Amino acid sequence: MNILWLFAHPEHRSLNASLRDDGVRALRAAGHEVRQSDLYAMGFKAVLDADDYAGDDAAGDAAGGRLLVGDAQEDGWRAGTVSADIAAEHEKLAWADALVVHFPLWWFGPPAILKGWFDRVLVQGLASKVKDAQGNTRRYGDGGLAGKRAVVVTSVGAREASFGPRGIHGHIDEVLWPLHHGTFFYTGMAPLPPFVVYGADRLTREDYPAVAEALRERLHGLGTTAPLPYRPERGGDYDEGLELRPELAEGERGLGIHSASGDRPVPVRAEGAPVRAG
Amino acid sequence: MNILWLFAHPEHRSLNASLRDDGVRALRAAGHEVRQSDLYAMGFKAVLDADDYAGDDAAGDAAGGRLLVGDAQEDGWRAGTVSADIAAEHEKLAWADALVVHFPLWWFGPPAILKGWFDRVLVQGLASKVKDAQGNTRRYGDGGLAGKRAVVVTSVGAREASFGPRGIHGHIDEVLWPLHHGTFFYTGMAPLPPFVVYGADRLTREDYPAVAEALRERLHGLGTTAPLPYRPERGGDYDEGLELRPELAEGERGLGIHSASGDRPVPVRAEGAPVRAG
């Protein structure tokens, strides 16, 4: 497979940087092609602004000089005038069969530099408001990035139970909902269960080999692991108002209803050895 | 009250900018003090990196020159050597009784420039790893920002039902979990129900007055609206492993179990004077 490894950590001597190096090595040893977007190393511009579409005079003119983000993105993307750093990421995205999205969890989400990658690179036309031949929006299980797989690799200071189904931080799959469902699945990618290093603050040098081995095992299954079983938008489970049909997960609410397996919340990680902190 | 309005939109002629102007005006007319952090207008640095703590030589030295984010934040904060733009936000935060956090929802989260505000400003010591006299961590319903209130003001293109309890995008309260629970409640702030402009792409000039009026009404209740009823960490509902006790929301899972309204109405903060409108 062709794999794009997105990496967002400010310290190249960190635990996560070591895991990235080991992961990339393992993928290459298994015969995969790997390219990287090491966002800190690239000095990636995090903040979406009008400069991203400065090459496209028409976009601003149409709105009387006012920046309408979605329109400016789509116009720039269609005209080939988005800024060069965005275009370079588009080329990598088109090339990739799978994305590894690797970051430390900060305030229960990706670091700003990674959020900015999604804001700036996943432009309208390519990643949102993608239409099929009948004019229907392709989204949630279909879309501009359909056919690709994506997996989060992240680290947290807390212990695993506190990110479990009844843990105080929220279940890790649901904490990552904006990425898993709102970004990966939304754009058509298949979101795989995340690889999470728990208790990262307490990890010792002696613990590292087991963590790296667990990551290698997960990467080994990158092409075969079953994705999170979200319901596709156009699979018949949602009504015209985009609400789940009343007879499915009847009377229930919560993010778990959007997973199809047995109409009940899914076990976090059906497979794969849990990583334990030392 | 003293109110800090955090604003993250790249276009000062946008719907959101108009709402911000109207909201600030209404708060001032009601006798409140309002200060703003208009992140785009400020050119706020979104990306946390070693430069944020460059004034603190000890931090890097202790780790052999390696950036340990939490430690560098806490050392810099205690020594008063964090960068000037972060210190300026700390001063506003200390001043504020309430935060309005206002942004367009991009990829189901805040724009990178706002995520970067949380990454950089909410430093360890002030906002995380805050200890009480007994050495217990003050978190979730208590913490360095206890006594303050916070409300999200945001806009989405989709219609309301699709962000409802059974909507395909996930319930807006749960989509915003990383902010509401993982950031506001985590640091001790009381998260209020969000103000959301739905169908923002389809809003016409004629619709605007009603939206602005609805926002003014919500802001009128900034000091009195009941917060989201999350369970405090140290209120007895969680066990030592930080899992919800089995007899509460028995057999259930999902983010909804962390709200107490089903079992019993628990005030967000067990102690401390509630903030009242001025």
Image (tube, coloured by chain):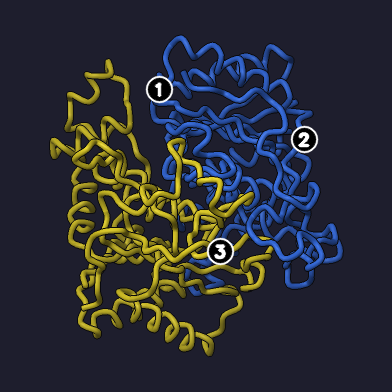
Chain colours: A blue, B yellow
Q: With respect to residue B204, does A104 lie above or below?
A: above
Question: Camera-side residue: B131 or A22?
Answer: B131
Label 1 marks which chain's residue? A
Amino acid type of disc 1? Arg
Quarter holding the N terminus of chain B? bottom left
Q: Is residue A111 above or below residue B217?
A: above
Quadrant where the C terminus of chain B sits is bottom left
In the rendered structure, are the residues bearing label 2 and label 3 in contact, judged by CB atoms less than 8 Å apart? no
Viewer-closest of A173 and B157: A173
The residue pinned by badge 3 equals B172
Residue behind mark 2: A226
Percent x, y for residue B135? 24, 36
**Badge 3: residue crowd in 10 Å (few <14, some 14–19, many ≥20):** some
Q: Which quadrant of the structure image shows residue B7?
A: bottom left
Q: Chain of mark 3?
A: B
Q: Are marks 1 and 2 in contact (CB under 8 Å)?
A: no
Quick check: can you spot residue B7?
no
Helix, strand or loop status at disc 2: loop
Q: Identify the residue at image location x=53%, y=73%.
A: A63
Q: Amino acid at mark 2?
A: Ala
